[in-house]
Amino acid sequence: MSQPTPDLDHVDVTYVANLARIELSAAETEKFQGELDDVLAYIHQLNELDLEGIEPMSHPHPRENVLREDVPVEAPDRELLLNNAPARVQDLIRVPQMMEDA
């Protein structure tokens, strides 16, 4: 069963506000309806552009691997880390109990 195609010429702000469970005053409804109509008009204007031969992109700027290089480093001193822990048991960090006993 296919979904009905939305009417992108006009979207009713009252309907959308109801879906979002937002109460709008008459002034807000009128204001937002005008803004939404402007957005839809701009989308229709964009749809008129000739995009033949232009590949879709996922980001406006070319991106390659933006992560730093994975370089092994010396591990911090174990004793120094354990001394910074609020509580410890031998060579382990003690944490609050997360589950109650059954």
Image: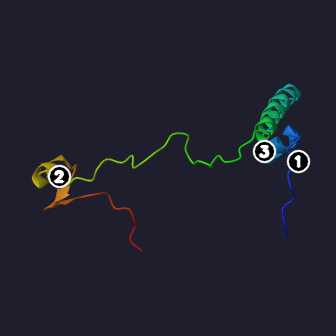
- Mark 3 and mark 2 lie on one chain; the one further toward the N terminus is 3
When asked about the image quadrant of residue 30, the answer is: top right
Tell me: 56 left or right of 2.
Answer: left
Which kind of residue does numbered mark 3 sit on? Arg
Tell me: 30 left or right of 65.
Answer: right
**What residue appears at the point 21 percent right and 50 percent down from the top-left corner?**
85
Which kind of residue does numbered mark 1 sit on? Asp
Front-most of 55 and 86? 55
Name the residue that disc number 3 marks: 21
Name the residue that disc number 2 marks: 73
Q: Quadrant of the C terminus?
A: bottom left
Check if mark 2's residue and mark 1's residue have beta carbons within 8 Å.
no
Q: At numbered mark 3, what does the secondary structure look like: helix, strand or loop?
A: loop
Name the residue that disc number 1 marks: 7
x, y percent for residue 100: 40, 67
Front-most of 89 and 58? 58
Check if mark 3's residue and mark 2's residue have beta carbons within 8 Å.
no
